[in-house]
Amino acid sequence: MLTINVNGTDRSVDVDPDTPLLWVLRDSVGLTGTKYGCGMALCGACTVHLDGQPIRSCTTTVGSIGTGKVTTIEGLSPDRSHPVQRAWIELDVPQCGYCQSGQIMSATALLAKTPKPTDAEIDTAMSGNICRCGTYQRIRAAIHRASEIAGEKP
Amino acid sequence: MSSILAPGALTRRDVLKAGAAGTGLILAVSLAGCTKPGSAGGERKPVSMNAWLRIGTDNSITFLCDRSEMGQGVYTALPTLLAEELGVDPRRIAIEFAPAGEAYRNSLIGAQVTGGSTSVRDAWKQLRLAGAQAREMLKSAAARKWDTTANACRVENGVIISPYGKRLTFGAVAEAAAALPVPQGVALKDAEEFQWIGKPLARLDTPAKVDGSATFGIDVKLPGMLHAALAQPPMLGGKVRRLDDTAAKGMPGVRHVVSTSSGVAVVADSWWQARKARDALRIEWDGSATAALNDGSILRGLKQASSGAGLVARQVGDADAALESARRVVRAEYQLPLLAHATLEPQVCTADVRAGACDLYIPTQSQGAAQAAAAAAAGLKPGQVNVHTTFLGGGFGRRLEVDVIGAAVEASKEAGKPVKLLWTREDDMTHDAYRPPAWDTAAAGFDGDGRLVAWKLHLTGPSITARVFPGAIPAGSVDPFCVEAAANFPYDVPNILVDWVRHEVGLDVGYWRSVSHALNCFVAESFMDELAYAAGKDPAGFRRALLAKQPRYLEVLEVALRRAGHDKPAEGRFQGIAVMEGYDTFMAQVAEISIADGKVKVHRIVCAVDCGQAVNPDIITAQVESSVIFGLSAALWGEINVQGGRVQQTNFHDYRVLRLDEVPAIETHLVSSDNPPGGIGEPATALVAPAVCNAIFAATKQRLRSLPIARHKLA
């Protein structure tokens, strides 16, 4: 038995420590918002946060995360109220939607560190996330928009 | 526009038959996450108004979406069509995916298929009529209660209002309404009366796609479900010669090792356990069937077949005679590679086989074919298989194939439990039904006055349709899905011949976004560019003159040229043009590029679109952006190579697709039109390669007659 902290809750999981975090989240914890796309950290569909940093959960073994805190798309907000989710809705970013959990997790990590990113900073932060539907133009615009929303006085 | 596979549109009798018969199925298919929260679950006493519409006595309204949502927007556009006539805000409607059923046959294809950019075109009359008929039935039922006439009543967002201002909800009269005869000859709204069609409306599936709650095929969860990974032959058409599963069977979580029709499935408690054990299987494969298959043999076969006579797809005048007597003849040969679909969600299927029944949970574009495949694998009748469609993590034609189903069903049957079978990315890349390769020759002739008097396109390639829909392409007839963007050659030339040689290449080829448009538009529009330069004219003016009798082509060309600033590209920038009609949509693209260090950089794609009446303008724009990027990935880098029967590419490191930092600016300009809707999920894919390659010629005077562009050194 291993204990991992996911979205603020400790979870006991009965898996081999070499199991990728992705499959622990999906099959053991039951959080399926995080997706499998390539298994080689090439596409970013499996992106989650570990202590606030974006990581590829398909190549991160569950045994390696220790007491680190994992945040998944389900833990971003209870009601789609995170500025990135709001911007994604406002600009109707998703098409098939399969990559979008990973896109959103990469974008939220970027904005947490860089509240007003330039296009070049967006390029660097987001180039690891593939979208086969090609929603990139809207993703870029939505990151700028999320930056505005986050900066607005409540 | 008629059905390719089975002429004749759906009759009302079919609809009603299936609508009634479908109720039981419909109630069984509610799948968590596939519906909007708080909809179907809370519905009281649902009443089926027709195959697509269910109204609860609590006034809940549910649309049964009979096309698959793979990003193209049917989840929003189709309920909009129904709601427009029904008289209700589309956002009030709950959506479920429809089961397999004859009522849901796509009349443009002849089967329940989401593809061919047909969904809105097919639904345009059908769903609006279904909405209008239901509205009239609801009005009649209310009118009877009020002792007035239906014509005296009106409908406002789900409420029927009497001439004296009395109000009844749809739900209050649904039961009475459903018992009334379906009215005939109901008039549909004129465009100027539209309240929802053509107006801005946010996608109805967006909320579930920003919080991880949308259920894709990979997300299906059933009580007692096991997980499977599949060892497939590493070579196309390979077979298991010898299997040693001793080590695999002893691994943690492993329950079953099943020899299936498409490989060896390991069934375990979790997918990772199944995957690890799969890799521990010791299998000796028989790869003799395709040992001699490789890129070179495929190309040689195509070239050899190309020397034979073709089946005529389009003939005007006598192109051969005109070429014979032409003052000047231009000839060229074009080649296109195999491509993978690479949907981001790999192939996946959950099967639950029980005595006398099977439930299939699958992201499919082809419910009827999925049902038939599952039935065959389970030893059941198709009617015993319930197909539950999930959201699709990308389709692009890949999920018209049913190759993932057999093994899932066989594994579930053996395990006696629900089994979710998921392919790895590597499985997916190496076991695709690939976009067909092509070898095409083009010839054109100018007369003594420099006029283009002959155009001949001789296409050679395999038929997808002959395999996927057996019997649909009789021997000796042209496969219409092989001559798109070729047979409809729009330019004013007195002698035209477009013909096609069918040549199978030794592996399964499949429908890939825009199908043969992407092959033939590259050839036709590149060659038109060659002819413009041969004639000493600029490519825009050359096309413009030959499109004088084609107003819809001409308009999109002019809009694209103007918006792109084609007269004066910036210093160091070069532009290329392509035009095409496909799926009843007219389109022109201008690509703007620069060349540096022997490589092309695509800065901007300007696309002008006339797709008839727009149903959801923002989704149209999104589909153009999507298609351009899909086509550009393929144009720049897309290539599947085969050596010794083995596909060489395995994952996104060697099958490169565009990333955010690599995309050009994409500008979409919709031309307003009162024509019926054209398809929009695919056509823009096809124009990118010729537009970019024509821009490359403008910059370098290098004519690229094969793809991908990365194969060529540019200077």
Image (cartoon, rainbow, N blue to C red):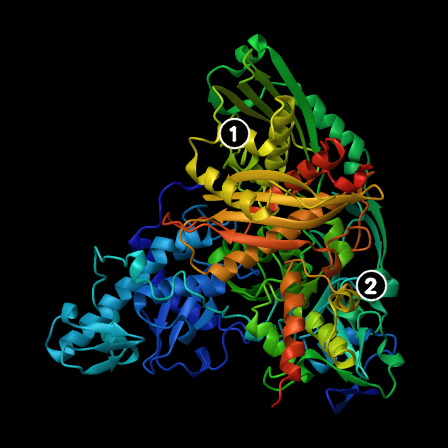
Q: Nearer the viewer, residue B23 or B74?
A: B74
- Residue B106's label in the rendered image is none
Q: Could you say which quadrant of the image residue B579 lies in? A: top right
Local SS, label 2: loop
In the image, are marks 2 and 1 on the same chain? no
From where the camera sits, is residue B432 visible? no
Query: Which residue appears at 70% of the width and 70% of the height?
Result: A103
Per the image, the residue denoted by label 1 is B478
Q: Residues within 10 Å of mark 2 (few under 14, many from 20)?
A: some
Give residue B43's position: percent from left, percent from top: 40, 81
Q: Are marks 2 and 1 in contact (CB under 8 Å)?
A: no
Local SS, label 1: loop
Q: Nearer the viewer, residue A47 or B272?
A: A47
| Mark 2 residue type | Met
In which quadrant of the rendered image does the C terminus of chain B lie? top right
Q: Residue furthest top?
A: B325
Give residue B370's position: percent from left, percent from top: 55, 55
Give residue B33's position: percent from left, percent from top: 55, 75
Q: Nearer the viewer, residue B54 or B475?
A: B54
Q: Could you say which quadrant of the image residue B218 lies in? A: bottom right
Q: Mark 2, chain letter?
A: A
Per the image, the residue denoted by label 2 is A40
Q: Residues within 10 Å of mark 1 (few under 14, many from 20)?
A: some
| Mark 1 residue type | Val
From where the camera sits, is residue A121 visible? yes
Q: Look at the picture and state if B699 lies above or below B415.
A: above
Give residue B444's position: percent from left, percent from top: 59, 20
Q: Look at the picture and state if A32 lies above or below B520.
A: below
Disc 2 from disc 1: Cα separation: 43 Å
- Tell whether B176 sits left or right of B199: left
